[in-house]
Image (cartoon, helix red, strand yellow):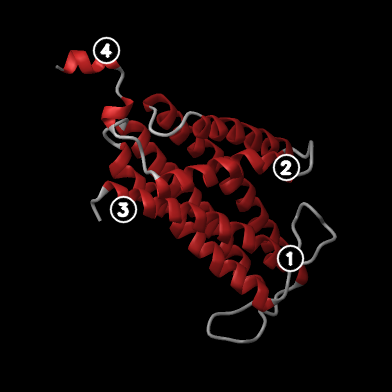
Amino acid sequence: MTNPRALARFAGLLYLVTWVTSVAAVPLYGGSAFDPTAALAGRTSVLVAALLEVVLAVAVVGTSLTLYPLLRSHGHGSAVGYVALRTLEASVILVGVVAILPAVARPASSAGSGLDPAVTAGLHLVHDWTFLVGPGLINPVNAVVLAALLLRRRLVPRFIPVLGIVGATLVALMNVTVMFGLATPQPLLAVPLFAWEVCLAAQLVLRGLRSPAQTTPARELMEVR
């Protein structure tokens, strides 16, 4: 797939997949370590949530790989950095998936894992930490890398990368305070980051990235000529 418009549309659809799978997986897992009294959900619910997170991880990497051919001519370092950071984020997500699965099941078996409740609670806690570190801390960094490039090269309307930078900052600060036990998660603070990815996805699907001719300042065009 080498057509820029096709790549942009596919990247936009992958962004939507990341949000649908990540949001859908949260309630399926049941409780969280942020609420010590909540319990992990049942076997089937957790298995479905884990499968959704596997799809999420693949889509996370897919967004960066699909955007890379479109971004490298505008900023090779940023484009490579975005691929690396998205891959790192996906890796952390998969660590959480592998950690949580033994808490509810064994491979090739319909029975429960039979683990001690304390071990199950520990695996649940590992999964919660991977959620905080991956989507909570690494994702804001890669959002800033991409948003800064889009803003600098004027590849999308200005408000979209501004939303990304503001939203990423809010989410990162919130999760740092959660990490140190200074606050509890505030879902409303994630709204700007959610809006950034939705707006970016819509831009990519409907219009794609602006062409170099549209984004190059007049002075640079005169120098090229």
Q: Secondary structure at mark 3?
A: helix
3 or 2: tag closer to the N-terminus: 3
Helix, strand or loop at disc 2?
Answer: helix
Which residue position holds label 2? 188
Identity, as a three-letter code, of the amino acid under mark 4: Arg
Q: Nearer the viewer, residue 49 or 153?
A: 153
Give the residue at mark 4: 219
Q: Residue at x 55, y 40 (%)?
A: 196
Say which amino acid is labelled 1: Gly
Select label 3 or label 2 by which is in front: 3
Task: Indicate the position of residue 81 as horizontal and vertical percent values.
Answer: 39, 37
Dot 1: few (<14), some (14–19), or many (≥20) neighbours within 10 Å?
A: some
- The image position of residue 149, as x and y in percent, is 40, 30
Q: Nearer the viewer, mark 2 or mark 1?
A: 2
Name the residue at 50% across, 38% down: 143
CA distance for labels 3 and 1: 38 Å
Q: Nearer the viewer, mark 4 or mark 2?
A: 4
